[in-house]
Image (cartoon, rainbow, N blue to C red):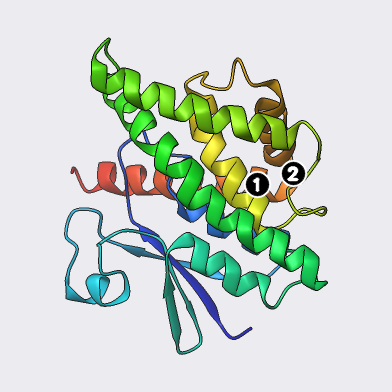
Amino acid sequence: MANLTLFTFDWVPEMPRGFVRDVRVRWALEEAALPYRVASVPFGDRGAEHFAHQPFGQVPWLTDGDLSIFETGAILLHFGERNAELMPTDPRGRSEATKWVFAALNSVEMASLPWALLKFTGNANDTPAWKFLDDFLRLRLKRMETVLAGREWLAGSFSVADILMSDVLRLVDRFDGLAEHPACHNYVARATARPAFVKARADQMAHFAAADAARKSQGT
């Protein structure tokens, strides 16, 4: 690969730290032992250049030479096309990994993210809306429990699909949402025990801690 640069925010509030999605890209880069650099973009002032690379003003995005890629699923598939550490090389394995990449982002995260946002904000109240979201997530977790009870990793060997699915479920686990789903919980524990994840998360936390120190020294 050409020169890889991962773009993320220069700073975020305490609550989302460790879960900002650049951790998924960091994790993949560490798994594949690919050299990369991290560049920061302002959290509070998202200008035209930011939107030119990420039209929704989010992070992360990645540059690989003259390529600019946004969305973590697209970035991880980009890596998987070139690295056997991240994607099976046989057609059946690649098909398995690819479909679980999309399942993580479309079928599971669409249920887990609104649920987790209400947990984050303290608005997970006894309301019909909350019950709907909770029931929706429980149904998705029930299906994933059946899948994960019978396998270590989603596509046979560890792949980008596991980075995405375990990170999606990790956010649910943060709020004890996997307590009744031991296969899902154990899968997350297995994935996050990998040295590449441990380093990726530590690096993200260190990145934002350094931003705190810089803001403090500047009196902001």
Q: Nearer the viewer, residue 204 or 48?
A: 48
Instruction: Tell me, for residue 194, which label it has, or none.
Output: 2
Residue 132 visible to the viewer: yes
Residue name at image x 61 percent, y 33 percent: 143
The vertical placement of 74 against 135, above or below, is: below
Q: Residue 114 occupies which quadrant of the picture?
A: top left
Percent across and percent down for residue 14 are: 35, 34
Q: Quadrant of residue 66?
A: bottom left
x, y percent for residue 190:
74, 36
Label 1: how many Cα within 10 Å (few below 14, some 14–19, many 20+): many
Judge left or right: residue 124 versus residue 105. left
Q: Secondary structure at mark 1?
A: helix
- How far apart are the two marked residues, 1 and 2, measured between alpha carbons? 6 Å
Three-letter residue code for mark 2: Arg
Residue at x 72% of width, y 27% of height: 183
Q: Is residue 176 left or right of residue 124?
A: right
The residue lying furthest to the top in this view is 126
Q: Amino acid under label 1? A: Phe
Q: Nearer the viewer, residue 214 or 74?
A: 74
Asked if the residues shown at circle 1 and circle 2 are in contact, with their CB atoms under 8 angstroms apart, the answer is yes
Q: Is residue 8 left or right of residue 174?
A: left
- Classify the position of the C terminus by image quarter: top left
Instruction: Give the residue number, with chain letter if any, for mark 1.
Output: 197
